[in-house]
Image: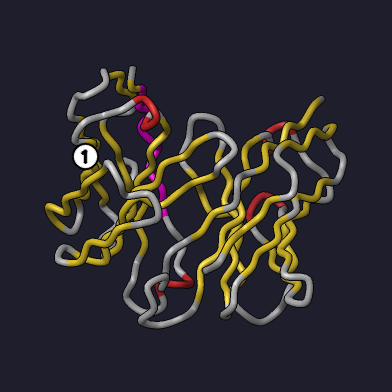
Amino acid sequence: AQSVTQLDSQVPVFEEAPVELRCNYSSSVSVYLFWYVQYPNQGLQLLLKYLSGSTLVKGINGFEAEFNKSQTSFHLRKPSVHISDTAEYFCAVSVGEAGGTSYGKLTFGQGTILTVHP
Amino acid sequence: DADVTQTPRNRITKTGKRIMLECSQTKGHDRMYWYRQDPGLGLRLIYYSFDVKDINKGEISDGYSVSRQAQAKFSLSLESAIPNQTALYFCATSDSRYYPERDTQYFGPGTRLTVL
């Protein structure tokens, strides 16, 4: 079974500073990795996803993430954050085993609350 | 109009009451999911449905049941609510036609349920 660990429950930063939100996963089969964002009082929406190919994935709002298979990580980064980036961020994994019981299901990490201060 | 809607958005109920949360989608997706969100635990899957005739338990299905009335509608019921079912509940959809493991899931706005 797959699992996801987000290493920081809360990350406070100042506006225009860089930020990294860390995510590690475990799985015995090939994985697909996602970052979702939840703004206050809203549902989740996709930031970016890694399916295959280039290990550096670019998403919406200037975010990017790098897939590192040897370290089983998928950290999310942004070089300069804005107040509007304040939200909770979730890393998630799905596995690619056709016909398996976990086929197509997402497993989420615990979430990281990013707070951007002026 | 939103693609995935949930009703009600907020509900306060008492222990032992039966509660139904409803989800509707206009995206034409086959797959629908119910999650609950608890602080510090992320989202956990309660039930999922690959089509109208295919319903599956997730990791925390005890105390919950679901009904897929149509492709567009997926309801979650708490037969006898208890306080530890107090949580934020999300419905989501995805298009399963080719590679479901790669699909983006689209979430509703959530239902905040409080069981007293």
Q: Determine which quarter of the picture holds residue A114.
A: top right
Question: Which x, y percent locates residue B60?
Answer: 38, 49
Report the predominant secondary structure element of the magenta stretch.
Answer: strand
Does the rendering let one see residue A56? no
* Amino acid beneath label 1: Ser
Total marks in image: 1
Hey, which residue is sitting farthest left in the picture? B69
Q: Which residue is mark 1?
A: B77
Out of A46 and A92, give the one closest to the viewer.
A92
| Element type where label 1 sits in the image | strand
Q: Quadrant of residue A83?
A: top right
- Per the image, is B113 magenta? yes
Is B111 or B15 nearer to us in this picture?
B15
Q: Residues within 10 Å of mark 1 (few under 14, many from 20)?
A: some
Residue at (26% x, 33% y) in the render: B7
**A79 with respect to A50 (left or right):** right
Residue A90 against residue B82 in the figure, above or below: below
- Chain letter of mark 1 equals B
- Residue depicted at 51% across the width and 73% down the height: A95
Name the residue: 63% across, 54% down: A60
Position of A31 relative to A36 (above/below):
below
Q: Looking at this view, is B106 or B19 the one in front?
A: B19
- Image position of A22 (left or right of B40): right
Residue drawn 60% across the image and 66% down it? A33
Q: Which residues are magenta?
A: B106-114
Where residue A84 sits, quadrant-wise, is top right
